[in-house]
Image (cartoon, rainbow, N blue to C red):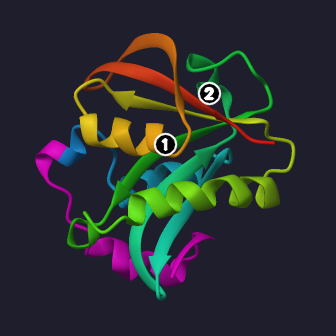
Amino acid sequence: MIKLTIYNDSYRKSLENYPLSEEQLSFTGHPLELLERAQINATYTPIIITEDDQSVGFFVLDTGDDKFHYTDMAESLLLRGYSIHPDYQGRGIAQKSMELLHSFVNKHFPNVKTIVLGVNEANKSAQAVYRKSGFIDEGRRFNGRSGIQIAMSKKIY
């Protein structure tokens, strides 16, 4: 069963054995890098995706001002650094974790009305996962660290 859990140090070891290819790292940050940023950035909430208590993915929910690159809504939340461990890719985990995101955000961030994210124009597989789970292209484009980013959003009711 797939679950979303707020990160705690019991997951650290599994993230140390989390190989992302150069191509994947051109689209996302490594979980350990994002955890370092979370240590100095109080707006970051690191999230672990688990399957039967095994770490299979990672992302950050960010309440900070970076979200305003994607939206004008103050009641929004930025999803960043999303990845699935390579050994678990292609099994529907990304799709299932996106389905769980709505209720997770409602529970842990009750004032949030919209989740926003940026996805690289070249990352077609990620775009497909986000679209399938209800994210829409907002028509905003901006330069990211690895090229043009597409701003996407999903309403939370």
Check if residue 112 falls in the magenta segment: no
Amino acid type at image mark 2: Lys
The residue lying at 41 percent from left, 77 percent from top is: 55
State the quadrant of the C terminus. Answer: top right
Question: CB atoms at circles 2 and 1 under 8 Å apart?
Answer: no
> Badge 2 is on which residue?
67
The magenta-colored residue range is: 1-23
Residue furthest to the bottom in view is 52
Up the image or down, 154 lies above or below 103; here it is: above
Judging by the rendered image, the residue that carries numbered circle 1 is 80
Vertical order, 7 against 143 (above or below): below
- Left or right of 124 on screen, residue 6: right
| Residue 115: image location, x then y, percent | 64, 37
Label 1 is placed on what type of residue?
Arg
Question: Is residue 16 shown in magenta?
Answer: yes
Location of residue 93 in the rendering, given as x and y in whole percent from the top left corner = 40, 66
Find residue 98 and name its label. none
